[in-house]
Image (cartoon, helix red, strand yellow):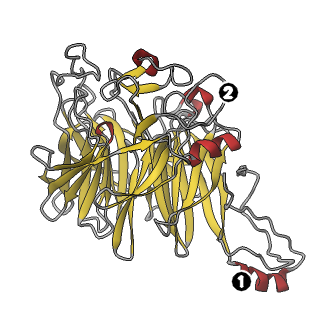
Amino acid sequence: MTTRIHPSQALLFAGLVAAAPFTSAAPIFTAQKLWTTQHGAGGLNTGVTSEIAAFDALGNTLWVAGVVGVDVLDANTGALVQHIDTRSLGAVNSVAIHNGVAALALENAANRTDPGLVAFYDAMTRAYAGSVQVGALPDMLTFTPDGSRLLVANEGTPNTYGARIGTSVPRVYGPAPADPVGSVSIIDMATRSVIATPTFAGVTQIGSHIRTNTGMDFEPEYIAVSPDGLKAFVGLQEANAMGVLDLTTNTFEKVVGLGVKDFNLPGNSIDPKDDGVVNFINVPVKGFYMPDGMASYAVGGVTYVVMANEGDFREDDGDRSPASSLGAVAPLDRLRISNTDSSPGDLYTAGARSFSIRDADGNLVYDSGDILDKAAFAAGIYNDGRSRDKGVEPEGIALLTLDGHVLAFVGLERTTTSAVAMFDVTDPYNVRYLDLIIGDGDVSPEGVLAYSHDGMHYLAVAHEVSNSTTLYRIGMVPEPATMALLGLGLAGLGLTRHRFARSV
């Protein structure tokens, strides 16, 4: 069983006591809910949605972006410091902050297939500091570790997709009539100008199961930069691929197909039917990984990429059909499958219902299997209505280093109440599932942000459906030997602890 973290479970110790030494050497991680802010409360900032958050260390503020603007919050209290209305510039999709400069990704509000903007603000004064034109539909942006460059994922989604060609199965779709080129804008922060806009034309493709027959081209979704700043890993979600961008030449060196996950293997079970009965079974179906949120870290000088395998079809769902359309019967009849890849008896669906770790060449190192869906079910927050689609739908991901441990936080978009899964990924080949952070009253984590400030560690979760942002403090109880020593002098003070080390 997993254990809920309720707001009333304040972090975690008023005092320390150890009646006997702990027998497990596994660290005990803790989480304390500090505050929740409801955006648009009282009729203010109408239209703001809580989607992506960024932290400014200089002013100790959280910037929460969502469509019509950004709410700047006091990180101590969650109180609104200022609302920045971006409607005159465009619809804001993302925000990133480095060294006092806030950058906003803005799609063209009149026509998203036209070039977008990156707008700059002084993070302390919130004053507008100019903008630069980038590609169509800039969906996400991130600074390189040293802050010298800003990378922008220009998704370039068409307004109208390509039409089906013929009646063959799997289906084939022609190109969209007006499909902006997917690209990455590389902005030099010294001059605040675009110095390169690499695309995928002529780039070597390796790996397997790259989806290219859906009536759209490669659409960059997310960017994770290697800790050394030499490479960027660009998620091509709908294509089930990852672009590897060389930041020494500002060109893509390859596109890697991410392969598929076999739901018929032990540990990869799914609940394929939304019939009100949750039944995790192995089924003869394969899932495209199709990551959304991504992050990277290094272990022993080797770079790894962490991915939340959400899955996604075309925006108009033209490449999606129920499996019954290809003759599948219960329990697979209602499963949503890719009609551009599936044929009778050979079914492929969107998403892996997991998070995974890959090396810098895209090779799979770890996958969480069926842990996420089962953890949500054990916690009583599994949404059976999403069973036929992508399960708990892992969306955002963030990494946090705490006392030598690297923690991964995976936002689950489709649970009945907010849930963020927590893993210890210190050793990418020996990953430990820890537990769920459950936020009662919040719904649908869209973006997760982990950061450290003044010696403390935090997790900010932006919720799109409940339109709320919640901040948690993340901590760790000392190792068992230390706890035993502390207990000798602190007996009677009492200990409230929350152990994140339960299996599902």
Using the rendered image of the protein, determine whether residue 63 is visible from the camera's viewpoint.
no
> Residue 208: image x %, image y %?
27, 45
* Quarter of the rendering containing residue 51: top left
The circle on residue 482 is 1
SS state under label 1: helix
Depth check, front residue: 382 or 419: 382
> Residue 69: image x %, image y %?
39, 38
Depth check, front residue: 211 or 458: 211
Depth check, front residue: 309 or 38: 309
Question: What amino acid is labelled 1 in the image?
Answer: Thr
N-terminal label among 2 and 1: 2
Q: Residue at x 25, y 23 (%)?
A: 159
Depth check, front residue: 294 or 156: 294
Q: Residue furthest top?
A: 167
Distance (Cα) linking label 2 and label 1: 46 Å
Q: Locate residue 412 relative to residue 278 in the image: left or right.
A: left
> Residue 330: image x %, image y %?
56, 21
> Residue 306: image x %, image y %?
41, 56
Q: Residue furthest right?
A: 492
Q: Locate residue 363 relative to residue 377 in the image: left or right.
A: left
Q: Residue furthest front?
A: 345
Q: Locate residue 7 relative to residue 150 in the image: left or right.
A: right
Question: What amino acid is labelled 2 in the image?
Answer: Val
The circle on residue 277 is 2
Q: Residue at x 81, y 69 (%)?
A: 495
Does residue 503 lie above or below 111 as drawn? below
The circle on residue 72 is none
SS state under label 2: loop
